Amino acid sequence: METALDVSGVQRIVLRGLGLSCVRHYFLGVTQPQKAREFLKSIVPHLPSAGQQRSHRAVTVALTYPGLQALRLQYQYLSAFRRLAPAFAEGAAARAAAHLGDTGRNESPGWQQPFLSPQTHVVLSIYADEDSGWTKRIAALHGGDPLTSGLSGWDTWIAGKQLGVGNDRREPFGFRDGISQPTVKRVHLHWAQRNPASMHVEPGEFLLGHANEDGSNRWRAEDVPQSVRDFVRDGSFMALRKMSQDTAAFAQLAADVQAKMCGRWPNGALVREGERTQPVEAPGDAELNRFDFAHDPHGHGCPFASHIRRLNPRSDVVIPPRKRVLMRRGMPYEEAAEVGLLGLFVCADLECQFEFLLSDWTREAPMLPREIAPDPLIAARDAPSQFRIPSAAGDRSVQLLNAYVTTRGTLYGFIPSLRALATIDSAAA
């Protein structure tokens, strides 16, 4: 029997999520390194750990690579991040075209601030059950005087709010969201027993300093100083990605085509062979993730090119044969006439997990037979493409004229453990 992993020092959002309805992501810049480090240490009690129960409010913190520099971390720490986590060190904007598929109107020079600002050092996110009282929450963190925090930018934020209630939370296209999440060995013990078909992976897929599915642990290599090992252990990387959704264009598609593109019906039910309308009865929560694709080897129900099948192939034979997993903590946003998703994707390896999914599997389906068309739902589309829908009666193709999702910005951050934040002075020069 698996023994439980001590996750008391892991920020709760990494492994368990927060289950809250509203968020404000604040993009802060370090103005006084020592004061900023003192502030980060002071708010550790406000950061829920993965070992704690859900609360009505929560704070999370992530640091960018320029933020580590601005906080004056020692050379050995900065050098280790550059060598072992190059995507994090280079930043998402510099890697967008080659590694994220952000071309054409998605190119990073057109991204919104503060995704491009070199002064974005700290992403401080405040979550709550209700969309009010933000000023009081911020004042409670910095004592009512933002100057004492050593950080600027308290007036720079983006907000998200859940659509739907309880477990029936929807993204702007109308589909139930947050259904398929991996489980972590030695962490989600009971959940894995109840959901045998879910992806049950090693802690190192999400936590630095632990072995991943390949059995490797680059942060414990002999050439990594012990002080660096201690600092990164139980930390994670995150990609905060703002994606605008063209709901008007998507609504012009037939309901069954929308479902085939996603791989599920709006209520979360997997698309089955022969279905042209959504099942009247929605599956129970326990059934939504309890499946693989062994029953649908030809893609007659859930197409190979659909969003959920290409980004989570489950039992399909894939090339290369490795799970590519992310924890997804997204929340919809609405700004003026624009709606979309603030996707927060958590992993231990931005290159082999987040970037691989977006640059490779989003462009070409990973299983055999390989699809040459991009993901019909989220891929950049600078020209019309064909979405193939296999069928026993004969394949059909739907021409997709629009890009239904447009990238507004992506930011890479390091989510440190509570221990690392509490002792951050020891890592500073």
Image (tube, rainbow, N blue to C red):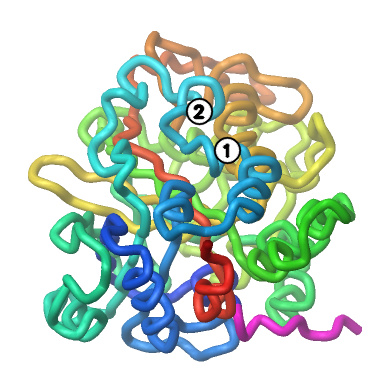
Above/below status of 93 relative to 348: above
Using the image as rendered, state which of residue 57 and residue 221 is in the foreground: 221
Asked if residue 158 is positioned above or below residue 259 in the image, the reply reads: below
Where residue 4 sits: x, y (%)? 78, 85
Name the residue furthest front. Answer: 429
Is residue 280 in view from this perspective?
no
Residue 139 vs 267, above or below: the answer is below
Badge 1 element: helix
Q: What residue is pinned by disc 2?
A: 95
Q: Which residues are magenta?
A: 1-9
Amino acid bearing label 2:
Arg
Q: Closer to the camera, 346 or 146?
A: 146
The spot of residue 29 in percent (x, y) is 28, 55
In this view, 311 is above or below 417? above
- The Cα atoms of the two marked residues, 1 and 2, are separated by 7 Å
- Give the SS element for disc 2: helix
Q: Of the residues under marks 1 and 2, which one precedes in the sequence?
A: 1
